[in-house]
Amino acid sequence: MTVFHKSRLQRCSTLSATLLVAAWVGGCSSSGDIDFRGAGGSGDGDAGGTNEVASVGGMSPGTMAGGTGGVGGGGGEAPSDPCEDGEWTCLRMGTKGPYGSHAIVVPAAQNWVNTGLFLTTGQTAQLTVEGGSWMVNNKEGQGIDHGSCLIGDLVARIGLHYKDQALTCVDGSATFTADKEGILFLGALPSNDLGESYETRRTATGEKTVRVESDGHTVPTVLATEAADYPFAEVSSGWVEIMGAHIIVTLPVATATVDAVVLETALDTLDEFYELHEELRSGVPQHGQRIRFFPDGTNPGLMLAGNPVRMKTTLVTAEKRISRAGQPGVGVWGYAHELGHDFSFVDGNWTYQVKTLESWPNIFSVHAFEKMQLTLHKNTIDCDMNSTGNYDAWSAWVGLCFLRQFEFAYGWSFYKDFFVELNKQQGNQGIKNWNTVHDAFETVAGEDITPIFEAWSVPNPG
Ligand SMILES: [Zn+2]
């Protein structure tokens, strides 16, 4: 029985008809159907946006980069620090400037290194490449659609605002002048910002060491485990990053101060989503590095997947904000969903998500919510093993219900086994359309699953 409300299908259909679009959560919500309730992050929607994804497809398969060096590891007797001793570059920094001079390792595979420096508009930093080399991907030297830097360049930027035009390419040395206030990030340019979500750093190897000198303020990285007692009020820049096991959240100090005692719970909640997604996928996105949630303020949706996951700024300021994740009444579906996108793109495989780019992430969300015994999103409650839907008019939620038919029939091991098959491939080779999805599903199920495809009029080879 089709039990989805007709109005929901109608509202979402024009958006979901745009195949394989960018991963905006907010697309369908803007039509009024899906309830985000401000900063709650409780809702989620269909894809909206553009066909930009096409510009990042077709990356040739390559080898995964190996581990890349961080800045820490200096020995001594102190216990290991997850920031300074980790695999990826992370600087703890003190609460106050002046920043001084720091030599920072920038791995090409790292989704932007937080230099620990905060600049006000017009303030400068001296950047000097001290050594190193990298290979980013097979599109080095090509331009992107925001700013003048080329793929493969060392780029400095304020914040991680979506498709920022103000990227500074650093060749040898440069005086960086902040076009707006914010945290200075460094990174190898692998593609445009959207492309990063689709693993354009998958083949990146090598690193460069960059000296950063400035009298600006600092941006401390605070472990979630120490947040309750951290002197946030002393941080002169007004910004910190909170680090969990798998997640980083960029937060204004005003929010961190108020939420200090609940930050560990928030990061634990997000980390648990990550770990449950990993369990389902048998793999991790973005080389296994932490996924950053960054308040962007420029994007048209609630959140955009990738690394960082870009958020509306209300998600760090409003009553139901990310730093209160795990507290009663604070919706967290959206965070699980965005991480679900990232886990659905592992190894640059994403074209298996035909007309389901906003449905597959919710397979991860449903799995995590069930394991954590959280209340599922209200748009999932009408879905059961007797549901059917019409492929030509379906929404992200109907697509999810179709995918869940296999969970209902075979349990979560079905999707675990499917992803094991998908993980044998890279860069959209193999399982990449409904025919190959159908065949893979049939292999996993061990029996003919064509009747389910037919009941939902999903294209299949029979
Ligand atoms: Zn989405």
Image (cartoon, rainbow, N blue to C red):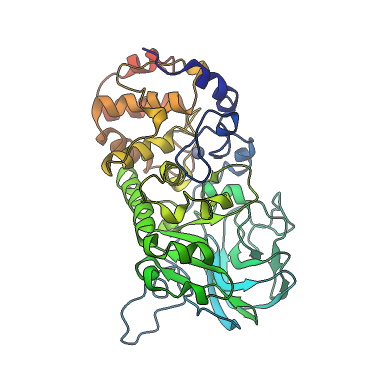
The image shows residue 88 at horizontal and vertical percentages of 45, 68
User: Of 107 and 315, which appears nearest the observer?
Assistant: 315
Q: Quadrant of residue 56?
A: top right
User: Of 375 and 209, which appears nearest the observer?
Assistant: 375
Looking at the image, is 398 positioned above or below residue 454?
Answer: below
Q: Quadrant of residue 141?
A: bottom right
Number of callouts in the render? Answer: 0
Q: Residue at x 35, y 36 (%)?
A: 366
User: Of 221 and 399, which appears nearest the observer?
Assistant: 221
The image shows residue 124 at horizontal and vertical percentages of 71, 76
The image shows residue 343 at horizontal and vertical percentages of 42, 45
* The C terminus lies in quadrant: top left
Q: Quadrant of residue 87?
A: bottom left
Q: Residue at x 34, y 68 (%)?
A: 225
Horizontal side of residue 186 vs 329, given as left or right: right
The image shows residue 128 at horizontal and vertical percentages of 65, 78
Q: Residue at x 55, y 68 (%)?
A: 239
User: Of 410 and 448, which appears nearest the observer?
Assistant: 410
Q: Residue at x 55, y 27 (%)?
A: 16
- Confirm whether residue 187 shows in the render: yes
- Confirm whether residue 109 shows in the render: no
